[in-house]
Amino acid sequence: MKNLFKSAVTAIVLIFSLSIQAQTKSPKLENSLLWEVSGNGLEKPSYLYGTIHMICGSDFFMSEKAKKAFESSNKLVLEINFADPNEMSDIQKMAMGKEPLSKKLSPEQLSRLDAILKKETGMTVQQVDGFSLMTVMSLISMKSFGCTDLKFYEMEFIEQAKKRNIEVGGLETVKSQFSILENAYSNDEMIDLLSESTPEETTKLVSLYKGENVDGAYAIATDLKFTSEKTKKAILDDRNKNWVKDMPEVMKKESAFFAVGAAHLGGEEGVINLLRKAGYKVKPILK
C-alpha cells in the first residue's frame, strides 16, 4: 500500500494538465507535439513539447524529431523540477490531507467517493481516508490506464538529461501547484472529475496523443460540463501566462527544451499563442 501511494503521489502533479474540464476558443494547431520557438532576439531556437505525463509502456513513444530537438538543447525545463530531491519530498508530504476525508467530506460525498473507488480500483474510502482528494484522483487516473508498466514522460526526460549532464529546471514549485489545485476545485467538482476518469476516456486521450493531435486532446481536456470558467482560468490560463513570463529569460541564455502537459499548448491563452503574441515565431516540427 505504501509503495502504491508513493507512485500515486508522484503522479499527482503530472495529471492535472490533461484533467482540466473547461471549454474555450482555440486557434487551429497542426498535429505536432513538438514546436520550435525562435526569433524575437533569440540566438538559438528553443523547443516546446507537449506531454501526456503518464502512459502505458506499450503506448510510450519518443519520435526521432523529439530526440533530435532534445539532443540539441542545453537545458530541460519541466512544469516542476522532479530532479530536485526537495520537490520530490514536498510531493510526498503534501499527499496527505490536512484532515481525514471522513471529516472533510459530507456523508453523501463520502458515499459517492466510495462507489467510485470500489468500481475503478477495488479499494474503499476507508483505505484512503488519510490522503488528499488529489492523491485519490491520481490513483484513480493511474488505474484508468489498465496497465502496471506506466511510464512518465517527465521522468524519461530527466533520465536522459542526467546522461547528458545538462541542467534541469522547473516553471513552478510543488507547493505553488498544490495551492492552485486545492483552490481551483470544490469537493463536489473534484468528485465529479474522479467519476469521469474512466478507462474509456483514457483510451480516447491516448489515441489522440499518439496521433499528436493537440487540438483533439485539448478538446477532451476542456469541457464546461465538468467545471467552471473560474477553475479553467486557474488551472490553465493563469499558469500559462506565468510560464510565458519566465520562459524568455531561459531562452535568451541557452537553447531549452520545455516539456509541459499538452493541454497547455492549445487555446487562446495557450503557451503557443501567448509566445506568438509576445513576438516569438512558434512553428510545428512535423518530421
Image (cartoon, grey):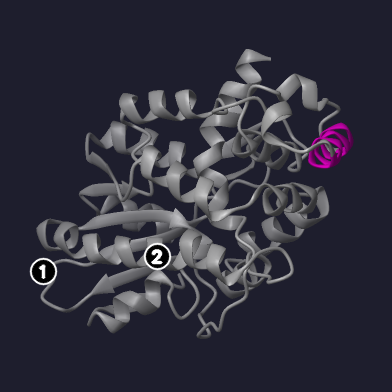
| Distance CA(mark 2)–CA(mark 1) | 28 Å
Q: In the rendered image, which quarter contains the C terminus?
A: bottom left
Q: Is residue 226 magenta?
A: no
Q: Position of residue 247 (x, y in %)?
A: 24, 61
Question: Mark 2 or mark 1: which is in front?
Answer: 2
Residue at left 34%, top 56%?
Answer: 258
Residue at left 16%, top 66%?
Answer: 44
Magenta stretch mostly in which secondary structure?
helix
Residue at left 46%, top 81%?
Answer: 268
Q: Position of residue 1 (x, y in %)?
A: 69, 15
Q: Is residue 118 magenta?
A: yes
Residue at left 26%, top 37%?
Answer: 164
In the figure, residue 34 lies in which quadrant? Answer: bottom left
Residues in magenta, as a range: 108-119
Mark 1 crowd level (few <14, some 14–19, many ≥20, 10 Å Cα): few
| Residue at the spot of label 2 | 238
In the figure, residue 216 lies in which quadrant? Answer: bottom right
Q: Position of residue 236 (x, y in %)?
A: 48, 63
Of the numbered discs in the image, which one, if any, rests on residue 43? Answer: 1
Element on which disc 2 rests: helix
Three-letter amino acid code at disc 1?
A: Glu
Mark 2 crowd level (few <14, some 14–19, many ≥20, 10 Å Cα): some
Count up the numbered dots.
2
* Position of residue 70 in the picture relative to residue 202 (left or right): left
**227 above or below 282?**
above
